[in-house]
């Protein structure tokens, strides 16, 4: 973690170099190891004249590949496609105003919850639409509205009928929008489209997703979106060509087909435009690392499969490969050996690269080194965004004096700690027990309690031993002692029992007291 003096390309590049040097990475190691640079589409990072990528290629290696974050591109594609759609503007107004209506009034929120309980529905409060992630925020807000549609319509209708309520005009307007057939149909259609796009976004944001994964995922998403041009999705089927939705009558007419065609065409066009560069040149060649893109059967019709991709990758990364001890001249030869071996002896769809390395690691080490290089290229900069989010949560206004090194260590723990279900604390416990300058006394209290119990047991056993000794020493006289007790009982019998003696003493005491007080009787 390094602070940036100025938020321009030289400032970012300088901070980046400081961060790498801080990790004891030399310039020679950078030239040998750095093969890709993932970032968002900001010009300060991607500028061809003075951007960060240009400085990296000039000072480190000209073979460094620029990968613009695919998740950011997806968000921008949705924003471009939906721009100018009148129904989306009305739908966005509905979602925004509905959130404000309940978020700013605890009374209305509580009444809405009571409406949910009265209808026997699970509470689904409205979500905020705005934010940096347009796709997920809009999708979440839409799903909440459809989950609680009946409760929203009923509660807003009740508020709209109360003329003395200050919220009456706003509730009436929102109730009218929720009852609009055109808006409800379009909203459910958009929910279907956003569900597909959101799924792609989540896949691209995973840490293990590489650029080689993205080709198939993007093409599958575009194919599904195209189908929605003529076919209804799960959400749209619940309302399409129906007069009621969730038990409430919809009002108005629907001119939906033209809007659907316009939205689908715009979405597909924007997706293809934003991701056009990954289907040509070097980025297109990375699909070689994805086994699912390989032909099912290797025959004469596809005998040249992968040759062009291998040649493109070898030519671009020739210097980097040579620095790692790879011979670029034999890479293409080993590719043919690798391809033939995998098709002849294995089912390609079931293979993974770790398994291939175990099988052919010695025989095809040069081509496998090239594959490892391709696997390291990122698909998005989502991990950086998560780091920024954690940094804001860690360095708050109450902890604004954290040193850079301390902040880096805290973020390292938070970003790289395993899930609780996957974490095995055995090694950490062992290190804690043995790693300190002094021996850990983690069983101190337990040992102390054991000592106390042992000492009490010893004391009890010693008391028993003393009694036994006394009995042993006087064992001969025990019978006589019992006899003495029996004799003493017989001797005292002449004077009466103990209770009789006590009664006599009480009588004498009472008589003396009466005499002192002057009572004769």
Image: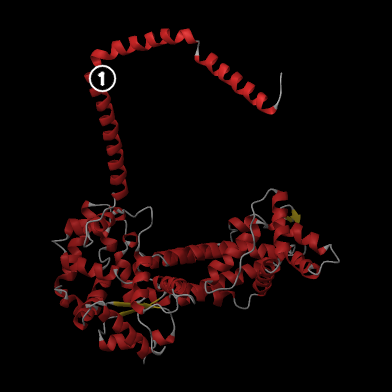
Query: In x, y percent, where is residue 422?
Result: 35, 54
Query: Along the line of sight, which residue is nearer the eye, 450 or 34?
Result: 450
Q: Left or right: where does residue 139 sit relative to residue 438? A: right
Quarter-wise, where is residue 381 in the image? bottom left
Name the residue: 32% across, 56% down: 296
* Residue 284 placement: quadrant: bottom left
54 or 451, nearer to the observer: 451
Disc 1 element? helix
Instruction: Say left or right for 110 vs 235.
Output: right
Q: Tally the marks.
A: 1
- Residue annotated with mark 1: 471
- Residue 267: x percent and y percent? 54, 72
| Rendered position, 58 above or below 320 | below
Q: Quadrant of the N terminus?
A: bottom left
- Identify which residue is drawn at 49% across, 77% down: 397
List x then y, in percent, for residue 161.
Answer: 84, 62
Confirm whether residue 210 shows in the render.
yes
Quadrant of the rendering where the C terminus is positioned: top right
Q: Nearer the viewer, residue 400 or 140?
A: 400
Q: Residue at x 47, y 67 (%)?
A: 201
């Amino acid at each position: 973690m390094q602070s940036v003096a100025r938020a321009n390309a030289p400032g970012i590049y300088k901070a980046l170099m400081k961060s790498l040097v801080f990790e004891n990475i030399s310039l020679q190691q950078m030239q040998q190891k750095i093969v890709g640079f993932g970032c968002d589409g900001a010009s300060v990072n991607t500028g061809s004249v003075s951007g960060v990528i240009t400085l990296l290629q000039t000072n480190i290696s000209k073979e460094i590949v620029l990968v613009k974050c695919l998740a950011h591109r997806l968000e921008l594609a949705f924003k471009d496609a939906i721009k100018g759609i009148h129904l989306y503007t009305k739908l966005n107004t509905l979602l925004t105003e509905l959130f404000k209506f309940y978020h700013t009034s605890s009374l209305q929120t509580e009444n809405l919850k009571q409406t949910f309980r009265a209808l026997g529905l699970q509470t689904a409060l409205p979500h905020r639409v705005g934010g940096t992630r347009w796709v997920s925020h809009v999708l979440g807000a839409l799903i909440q509205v459809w989950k609680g549609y009946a409760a929203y319509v009923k509660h807003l209708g009740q508020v709209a009928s109360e003329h003395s309520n200050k919220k009456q005009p706003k509730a009436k307007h929102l109730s009218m929008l929720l009852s609009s057939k055109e808006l409800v149909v379009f909203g459910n259609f958009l929910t279907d489209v956003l569900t597909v796009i959101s799924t792609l976004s989540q896949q691209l944001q995973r840490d293990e997703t590489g650029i080689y994964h993205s080709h198939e995922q993007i093409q599958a998403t575009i194919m599904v979106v195209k189908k929605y041009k003529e076919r209804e999705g799960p959400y749209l089927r619940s309302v399409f060509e129906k007069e009621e939705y969730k038990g409430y009558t919809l009002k108005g007419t629907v001119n939906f087909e033209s809007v659907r065609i316009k939205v689908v065409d715009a979405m597909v066009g924007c997706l293809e435009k934003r991701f056009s560069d990954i289907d040509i040149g070097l980025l297109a060649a990375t699909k070689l690392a994805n086994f699912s893109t390989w032909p099912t059967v290797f025959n004469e019709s596809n005998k040249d499969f992968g040759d062009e991709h291998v040649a493109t990758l070898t030519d671009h990364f020739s210097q980097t490969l040579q620095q790692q001890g790879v011979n670029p001249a034999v890479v293409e030869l080993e590719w043919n050996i690798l391809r033939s071996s995998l098709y002849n002896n294995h089912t390609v769809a079931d293979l993974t690269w770790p398994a291939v390395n175990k099988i052919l690691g010695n025989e095809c080490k040069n081509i496998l080194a090239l594959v490892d290089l391709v696997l390291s290229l990122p698909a998005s900069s989502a991990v950086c965004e998560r780091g920024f989010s954690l940094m804001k949560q860690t360095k708050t206004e109450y902890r604004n004096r954290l040193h850079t090194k301390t902040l880096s260590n805290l973020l390292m723990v938070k970003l790289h700690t395993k899930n609780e279900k996957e974490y095995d604390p055995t090694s950490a416990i062992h290190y804690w027990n043995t790693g300190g300058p002094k021996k850990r006394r983690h069983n101190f209290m337990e040992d102390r309690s054991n000592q106390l119990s042992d000492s009490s047991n010893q004391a009890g056993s010693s008391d028993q031993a003393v009694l036994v000794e006394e009995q042993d020493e006087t064992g001969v006289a025990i019978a006589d002692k019992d006899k003495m007790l029996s004799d003493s009982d017989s001797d005292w019998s002449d004077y009466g029992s103990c209770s009789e003696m006590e009664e006599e003493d009480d009588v004498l005491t009472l008589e003396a007291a009466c005499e002192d007080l002057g009572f004769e009787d």
